[in-house]
Amino acid sequence: MTVPAMERLVRAARDTRGYVAAWRAAHPDGKVLGVMPMNFPRELAHAAGLLPVIVPDDQEPVTEGRALLPEFYCGFTRNLADQVATGRLDLYDAVFMADHCIQLVGAADVARQLQPETPVFFGMLATSLSDAWAGQKVAEMMNTFREEVEALSGSKVTDESLRASIAAYNADRRALRQIFDERTAGSTAWAPTELQDLVASAMVMDPVEHLALLELARAEKVGQPRDERVRVHLSGHMCHAPRRELLQVIEDSGALVVDDDLWTGRRFLSTDVDEVLEPMEAIGHWYTSRNGNLPCPTRVQHDADWDTWLVESTERSGAEAVIHLMPKFCEPHMLLYPELRKRLDAEGIAQLLIETEHEGIPLEAFRTRVEALVERVLRKRPAYA
Ligand code: SF4
């Protein structure tokens, strides 16, 4: 029996280990690279013949890894430490990260300490993107990444192979963006959990295979007119996916998610790699331009503000409210949040902050708060008065 495309994508998204095992069976000499979010250019590793997998929070409870990082580290990094402690991170032949957050560096140190047989490569990319030297520094680090993936794979990254990988990932991103745009336009009703699975599977799968399934899944999707629920934008949640049950509660509480800037959403899709520039130059340009397209609280750039982007985004999508999803103890998000709140208040946009936990999230309390937000927005609608 043929398995529907959507079901295959969901499996890849939720069972990384199963997908990697199948890939290894088909590529007996192939190596799998664990890539930490959110800045490593997977195109480089793919061009070297590796399977680059963005290491997910596998949503398992934190057990043996509990003592390895302080309790005030974010759930994602504590989950990574637990993946190391319980041997789940042995899925990867090596782990690469482009630094963006001190908590993630802590998790990488745990991997180095407990799993010394797995190479962990740590590269610093410029975080202050307005500095005159940022472009040069980024280019140097991208060249180092290239050398490291070549050493790991034993294959050269030629300009030709890199161009092919860039084209493959761009095509997959474009197709995903089209689906996200259809959701925002209201022409197709994709639930946030479905979109999360589409993006999470893209983070794991080979891009050519993913694109083929994505096109089938899009064709299988039945169009459905938008209903009258309150239109909301989901914002935040760096590095890992919000819990599916939380997304479900949001939509069950009278809200309809029409757009987002989640890492497992539009943030992941925000920027293609230029196919006209020389490929290595294009890879550096991809990194330095992403923050302008969708600002990230882990980067600094004078002409890119997340709050301005958020206001403009709600104007484009017609979102009536913003729900901030903040992983507990995510410092970059916590630091930026007061600015976001102030700006949205000034613009009269209704908002709600939900601090997410790695496990044991109080779903019913969240339901009550989302229902209250929905009620507030409905009272502002002209037809309600
Ligand atoms: S950016 Fe936030 S979610 Fe990501 S590793 Fe840092 S603290 Fe954790």
Image (cartoon, rainbow, N blue to C red):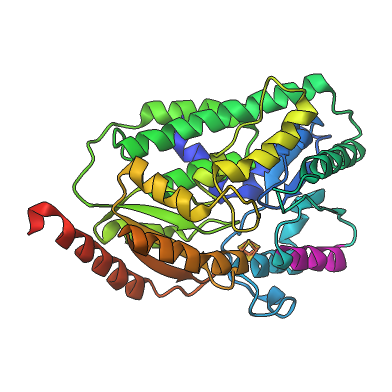
Q: Which residue is at the front of the view, 261 or 183? A: 261
In the picture provided, is 190 more to the left or to the right than 45? left
**x, y percentage for residue 196?**
48, 47
Range covered by the magenta-colored residues: 104-115
Task: Examine the structure image and report whether residue 110 is included in the region drawn in magenta.
Answer: yes
Q: Position of residue 54 (x, y in %)?
A: 67, 48
Q: Is residue 155 left or right of residue 70?
A: right
Q: Residue at x 57, y 68 (%)?
A: 335
The mark tally for this picture is 0
The residue that appears at 47% across and 61% down in the rendered structure is 243
Q: Quadrant of the C terminus?
A: bottom left
Q: Residue at x 53, y 49 (%)?
A: 264
Image quadrant assignment for residue 115 = bottom right
Where 379 sits versus 155, above or below?
Answer: below
Which quadrant would the N terminus be assigned to in this image?
top left
Query: Which quadrant of the render holds ligand 1?
Result: bottom right
Up/down of 63 relative to 162, above or below: below
Q: Is the magenta region chiefly helix, strand or loop?
A: helix
Q: On the picture, is 320 further left or further right than 288?
A: left
Q: Is residue 173 visible?
A: yes
Residue closest to the eye, 331 or 149: 331
Residue 21 visible, this angle? no
Task: Name the residue rendered at 57%, 48% in the picture.
Answer: 304
> At which x and y percent is residue 93?
82, 48
Relative image position of residue 292 (x, y in whole percent)? 58, 43
